[in-house]
Amino acid sequence: MTPQRIVSVVPSQTELLFDLGLDTEVAGITRFCIHPADKVQAKTKVGGTKTLNLDQIHALQPDLILANKEENTREQIEALQRQYPVYVTDINTLPDALAMIRAVGGLVGREHEAEAMAQQIASNLSSSFPHSSPPLSVAYFIWRKPYMVAASNTFIDAMLEAAGFRNAFASQTRYPEITSDDLRAAHPDLIFLSSEPYPFADKHRAELNAICPSAQALVVDGEVFSWYGSRLLRAGDYFRTLNSKIALLK
């Protein structure tokens, strides 16, 4: 039976549900689920992604919960699994994301919509971008104090590659803390300051450029690089625009 009381505790997967055509079926979301803005306002908030209010979730009596290995805590998800069907995603690559979109579509009775969406994303990202050859290296910052970057074995790393860049910290894994000396040693061509989870803004570019003057620093849309649901529909155009902007900066 198609779920009628879905709780999504992952922002990108919440957006995916709405973009697949669901609305009344979405019973609960997190306070970080901000897209689409006109839909999420009226939904019950069940805490943060890592601080779920289990009592609120129990009150909703969900018949499906969408969670993620990285974004949610193991203890809370295991507690929910003892009472409800929980679909836990683990996304590190673009094929992972496309498989998740198709799987979620199947779970919620939107197989055709999900397949069309996955094919459109794959098509948009398969075309070439006006990037450099060899690829420019990027230090992708996700946090400040301490500095943290996205390294290998992350979805951000996969999206950097899809956009035509090379990760300057590919020799490390996940989200390592780095020092100013580490950044200088990596000698990236570009420094990307993600708009989330840390709210990097233009004022932070000078700070990083002072450490690594040879690199061009830019604030980039963190949702495009790290949200692995229907937000990927915007990725192809965004990457083309970003590459064109970088070409003009040379």
Image (spheres, rainbow, N blue to C red):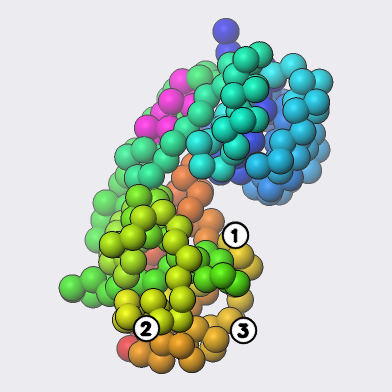
Which residue is situated farthest in the top direction here? 1
Q: Secondary structure at mark 2?
A: helix
Residue lying at 59% horizontally and 24% vertically, measured from the top left: 78
What residue is shown with label 2? 184
Q: Is residue 104 magenta?
A: yes
Residue segment shown in magenta: 98-106
Q: Is residue 210 above or below residue 29?
A: below
Secondary structure under tag 3 reads: helix
Q: Nearer the viewer, residue 55 or 101?
A: 55
- Residue 118 lies, in percent from the top left, at 38, 37
Res 137 label: none
Residue labelled with disc 1: 197
**CA distance for labels 3 and 1:** 16 Å
Residue 155, horizontal then vertical, whole percent: 40, 50
Tell me the chief SS of the magenta region. Answer: helix
Q: Do callouts 3 and 1 mark residues in contact (Cβ within 8 Å)?
A: no
**Relative to 48, is 232 on the left or the right?**
left
Residue type, label 1: Pro
- The residue at the point 45 percent across, 81 percent down is 180
Q: Is residue 165 magenta?
A: no
Query: Which badge, 3 or 2, is on the more N-terminal residue?
Result: 2
**The residue under label 2 is which amino acid type?**
Arg
- Answer few, some or many: residues within 10 Å of disc 1's Cα (few below 14, many 20 plus, some between 14 and 19): few
The quarter of the rendered structure image containing the N terminus is: top right
Q: Amino acid at mark 3?
A: Lys
- The number of callouts visible is 3
Front position among marks 3 and 2: 2
Q: CA distance from mark 3 to mark 2?
A: 20 Å
Residue at mark 3: 203
Q: CA distance from mark 1 to mark 2?
A: 23 Å
